[in-house]
Image (spheres, helix red, strand yellow):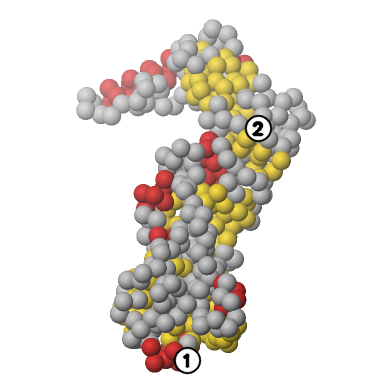
Amino acid sequence: MSHSPRIRTVLSCTLLVVALGAGAVGCGSTDGHPLSAQPYDAAGQVDFNGPSEGKKADPDKPIEVTGQGDDGRITDVTATDAAGRYVAGELSADGTRWHSTTPLAAEAMYTVRVSTENEDGSPGRKQLTFETGAAKKKQLKVEFGPEAGTYGVGQPVTAELSEPVKDKEARAVVERALKVRSQPAAEGSWHWVDSKKLHYRPKDYWPANATIEVSSNLRGIKVTDKLRGGESKPLKLKTGDRIEAVADAGAHYMTVYRNGEEINSIPVTTGKPGFSTRNGTKVVLGKEYFVRMRGTSIGIAEGTSDSYDLPVYYATRLTDTGEYVHAAPWSVGSHGAANVSHGCVGMSTGNAAWFYETVRQGDLVRTVNSDGEDMPAFGNGLGDWNLSWNKWRAGSAVFGDAPDGRSKVDAARLRPQV
């Protein structure tokens, strides 16, 4: 290789420095090479173990770039797919070999950029492209929830997996590929409820009037030896105002707040002894204008003193097992004075109608000063907010330190109440 172009460049640079004077800025780069030097084509300096023309690479096999000859070395290799995902790799200390250390995605187009340096320090470049073939493994699909729409600031994002993932390292692969972005931004984390379900929530509640976008980069990624990521439909959610209701079972009143300001104080009745309302924060699951509530549904025999069969209106559901905020005109004399329900928060028909129209799915209802048990984090609706932030992150395979990456799910399912 002729060195004369390099000499001419250096001489011209020297003359420029003399002409500008002792205080002038030189034209050399920070590594001592002339800025005007163009990288040479390093095709003859490197070998690549990629597929032959017209073929596709096996995504389960690593890629490797090796140096040729004694007149240079590899200085850097960058490999990315069309989605912008980087492939981690390792370069030998002598610059003779680079190989990938993470699996490739299936059915993906890759670009490999190789940087070299010859014996004189001149930079070389080589760009390689190849495509990977289809995965020979079962696909792991992800379904995000809830459905697209506007929710309260307490609504967690859910991810349902089509196959169980139990290994902690495999869970970390999945978790890193599931992206949640909000505007305004909010710090948050995934939490493994079980081997097929994850929940995502912020450290605090979502910002009011926020936009939340959920997506997966899992397509084609190796999760386990028998499982690769499949297609997933992205999800877009919005939040409304921050609506919080606090039902004080001791004072027999519910106070409702919008964006931190009190907007109503309602006399209520909560669960009587033996049917006390659960303490803790519950997320509104939905609203039903009419529900028929029967004592037999929770094991109360007909004809006993606690049996009931009632038409109930303006019912806002808080748990899977039947805890509601609803109209209870039959107990209006006890509202604001005594707890006489079977666990629900009862109020007048007018107040229940107002509450029904004010709240939406994802809003927050917190019960305090009850003799009832604590609301479980999982297994009976959405009790996610009853875990501290540290305990929530402990259920993450990326951030947590749980022995197997799983959360400790409270399996106890309390009886439904009305």
Q: Residues within 10 Å of mark 1 (few under 14, many from 20)?
A: some
User: Horizontal placement of 110 versus 37: left or right?
Assistant: right
Total numbered labels: 2
Farthest right residue in view: 54
Residue furthest out toward the top: 70
Judging depth in this view, the residue of 158 and 235 nearest the camera is 158
Q: Position of residue 291 (x, y in %)?
A: 59, 82
- Residue type at tag 1: Pro
Quadrant position of residue 207: bottom left
Residue drawn at x 46%, y 68% as measured from the top left: 283
Residue 304 lies, in percent from the top left, at 54, 81
Quarter of the N terminus within the rendering: top right
* Residue beneath the point at 22% across and 24% down: 22
The residue to which callout 1 is attached is: 329
- In this view, the residue in front, 235 or 116, is 235
Q: Earlier in the sequence, mark 1 or mark 2?
A: 2
Residue 318, percent across and down? 49, 71
Question: Which residue corresponds to the image point at 48% horizontal and 86% vertical from the top-left?
Answer: 327
Give the side of residue 360 with respect to residue 126, left or right.
Answer: left
Q: Quadrant of residue 249?
A: bottom left
Residue at screen point 62% across, 50% down: 161
Give the x, y percent position of residue 86: 54, 36
Q: Name the secondary structure under disc 2.
A: loop
Residue pointed to by mark 2: 225
Which element type, helix, strand or loop, lies under badge 1? helix
Q: Is residue 318 left or right of residue 31?
A: right
Which dot, 1 or 2, sits closer to the camera? 1
Residue 262 visible to an observer of this rendering: yes
